[in-house]
């Protein structure tokens, strides 16, 4: 399977020009180390840990499509960054015997860019569009007929002499990835035969992922250490991969061939890694609710103003992990910090 990308790795970073803290960019940069990630990417279903329901359904859809000799239905994958959306798309391409072509919503400027990409596909290829919620409207509209009827209509020429030309496309599968399911327009969303949501990984799954990474990186790891790393990784494989790699350096600098509790202690302290995977943005956010608003339920627009951050950043980047850890509650009246959340501020 060939994997081609029309993305420079940095283009994948969501830019947030308004704010000075630019949390999205910072968090993505912190956890995005594309080159290093490639070697750790699971290449088959058997290597892919967790997301059981999603995977089980997907296997059924793939086997059905293969039996009928049809392309797999278009898929929309949603979920926070670093949980395996791109990785899974590679596995799907492999299973379907096609190539994976990678691009992203912001990287596609003109209708011609998308048309060129679509017409260069072959049967069974997977076109992966990351951040599909950021696709421009005319391009999104081009996808409607491409997805439904495998055709696109292009306008050739200008003014009175302009003509519409219909082009047929191969039987491809579109995989759209998004961290913002709610921002996908209805007509586009409805054209996906399968909408799958990535969940944060369970602690035991994270531990398995940590141990797999250590094995690939050829470093032994004590099970107490893999547990500590899995707890500090925000339930996100990309983060645990980075921590294992960094701790391997700490172990080697002590002439050790194993990551153990001591390596974690020294490494976590040196790298500022929190045992629960929280960073200063998380604490600042929780503290704002507890201290400025006396932990009375506070609405999202008030929080955006008080935290000088966009709604999207708060809802898509900061809150999901705090909610998952039970540190924050979203009630109908607003956000409040839980007792567990207050404890992490002590
Ligand atoms: N289920 C998994 N099992 C093992 N490793 C995984 C799994 N999911 C992800 N990884 C690891 O995490 C890294 C990040 O995954 P990936 O790039 O697919 O995330 P993503 O959801 O596409 O992120 P983004 O939204 O930022 O594009 C991969 O390189 C891979 O090594
Ligand atoms: Mg990705």
Image: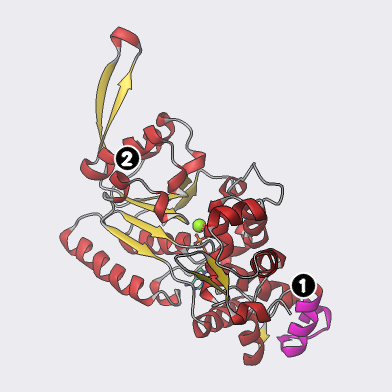
Q: Is residue 260 magenta?
A: yes
Q: Are marks 1 and 2 in contact (CB under 8 Å)?
A: no
Circle 2 crowding by C-alpha within 10 Å: few under 14, some 14–19, many from 20:
many
Q: Mark 1 — residue?
A: 272
Count of numbered labels shown in the rendering: 2
Q: Picture quarter containing residue 196?
A: bottom left
What segment is highlighted magenta in the picture?
Answer: 250-269
| Magenta: main secondary structure | helix
Q: Picture quarter containing residue 44?
A: bottom left
Circle 1 crowding by C-alpha within 10 Å: few under 14, some 14–19, many from 20:
few
Report the residue that reaches farthest toward the top: 160
Q: Does residue 188 sit above or below 260 in this rendering? A: above
Q: Mark 2 — residue?
A: 143
Percent coordinates x, y for residue 122 in the rendering: 32, 45
Percent coordinates x, y for residue 1 in the rendering: 41, 57
Point 28% across, 44% down: residue: 187
- Secondary structure of the residue carrying numbered label 1: loop
Point 30% across, 14% down: residue: 162
Q: Does residue 131 sit above or below 93 in this rendering? A: above
- Secondary structure of the residue carrying numbered label 2: helix
Report the residue that reaches farthest toward the left: 68
Q: Which sits in the foreground, 249 or 263?
A: 263
The answer to whether residue 205 is left or right of residue 77 is right
Q: Quadrant of the C terminus?
A: bottom right
Q: Does residue 278 sit above or below 258 in this rendering? A: above
Q: Is residue 236 visible?
A: no
Percent coordinates x, y for residue 112 in the rendering: 41, 29
As measured in the structure, the alpha-carbon distance from the residue carrying label 1 to the one carrying label 2 is: 44 Å
């Amino acid at each position: 399977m060939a994997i081609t990308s029309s993305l420079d790795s940095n283009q994948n970073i969501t830019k947030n020009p308004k704010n000075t803290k630019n949390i999205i960019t910072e968090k993505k940069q912190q956890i995005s180390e594309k080159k290093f990630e490639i070697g750790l990417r699971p290449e088959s279903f058997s290597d892919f840990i967790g997301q059981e329901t999603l995977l089980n359904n997907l296997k059924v859809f793939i086997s059905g499509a293969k039996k009928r000799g049809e392309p797999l239905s278009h898929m929309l994958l949603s979920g926070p960054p670093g949980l395996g959306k791109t990785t899974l798309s590679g596995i799907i391409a492999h299973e379907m015997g096609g190539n994976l072509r990678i691009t992203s919503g912001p990287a596609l400027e003109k209708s011609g860019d998308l048309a060129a990409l679509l017409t260069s596909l072959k049967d069974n290829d997977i076109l992966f569009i990351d951040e599909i919620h950021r696709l421009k409207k005319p391009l999104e509209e081009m996808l409607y007929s491409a997805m439904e009827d495998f055709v696109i209509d292009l306008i050739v020429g200008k003014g009175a002499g302009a003509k519409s030309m219909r082009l047929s496309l191969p039987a491809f599968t579109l995989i759209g990835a998004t961290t913002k399911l709610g921002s996908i327009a209805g007509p586009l969303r409805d054209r996906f035969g399968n909408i799958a949501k990535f969940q944060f990984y369970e602690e035991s799954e994270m531990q398995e992922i940590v141990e797999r990474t250590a094995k690939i990186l050829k470093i032994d790891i004590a099970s107490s250490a893999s547990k500590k790393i899995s707890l500090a990784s925000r339930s996100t494989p990309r983060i645990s991969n980075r921590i294992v790699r960094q701790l391997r350096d700490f172990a080697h600098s002590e002439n050790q061939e194993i990551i153990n509790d001591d390596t974690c202690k020294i490494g976590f302290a040196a790298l500022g890694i929190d045992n629960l995977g929280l960073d200063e943005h998380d604490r600042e956010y929780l503290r704002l609710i507890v201290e400025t608003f006396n932990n009375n339920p506070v609405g999202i627009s008030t929080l955006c103003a008080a935290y000088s951050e966009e709604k999207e950043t708060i809802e898509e980047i900061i809150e999901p992990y705090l909610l998952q850890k039970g540190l924050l509650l979203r009630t109908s009246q607003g956000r409040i910090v839980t007792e567990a959340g207050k404890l992490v501020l002590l």
